[in-house]
Amino acid sequence: MFNPSSRLRVNDRHVTASVIDGEAIIINLESGLYYSLDQLGAAAWELLASGQSIAAAADALAQACKGDSSVIAADLQHLADQLASSGLVSLIEDATVPTAAVDLSAISQLSWAPPTLNVYDDMGDVLALDPPLPQVAID
């Protein structure tokens, strides 16, 4: 779906996210599903959400954790596809959108491992901004 030059943006209208103690917590307020990415995945999320291209994010991660940028780029493309299919991100169409700097010092001692997007649905009705109402039978 995406290529190395693809840049992503968070779907801010219905997605909120924060990185806390090296873990990215991402909530889809429409569906009520929430997601997590730990350490390397959280760093990948921050880079992608900052508007950096997949290739630039892969290069930054490769430099930070001494990994192979082509392997990391493939892993990031897979992650980007998962994030997009979950409705969390979409493609940036405007090439003039600026990128933000991301501090990767917290992952400098880690070895690269593909990020795993964990999905949780146990609080869907609570987290959904507009949860479905219970059905009431009318006679």
Image (cartoon, grey):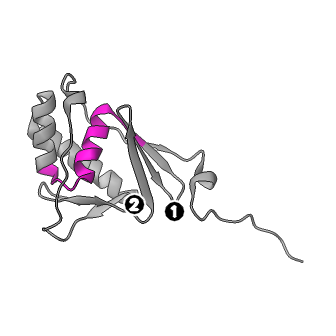
C-beta proximity under 8 Å, tags 2 and 1: yes
Any mark on residue 138, and which? Answer: none
Q: Name the residue rendered at 11%, 58% in the picture.
A: 5
Q: Say which residue label 2 marks.
A: 87
> In the shown orientation, is residue 128 left or right of residue 107?
right
Q: Name the residue rendered at 76%, 67% in the picture.
A: 135
Q: Amino acid at mark 2?
A: Gly
Q: Image quadrant of residue 97?
A: bottom left
Write the start and end of the magenta stretch as one range.
Answer: 36-55
Q: Image quadrant of residue 125?
A: bottom right
53 is within the stretch colored magenta: yes
Is 55 placed above or below 8 here? above
37 is within the stretch colored magenta: yes
Q: Say which residue label 1 marks.
A: 30
Q: Name the residue rendered at 24%, 59% in the picture.
A: 8
Task: Decide: few, some or many residues near mark 1? Use Cα within 10 Å; few <14, some 14-19, many ≥20.
Answer: some
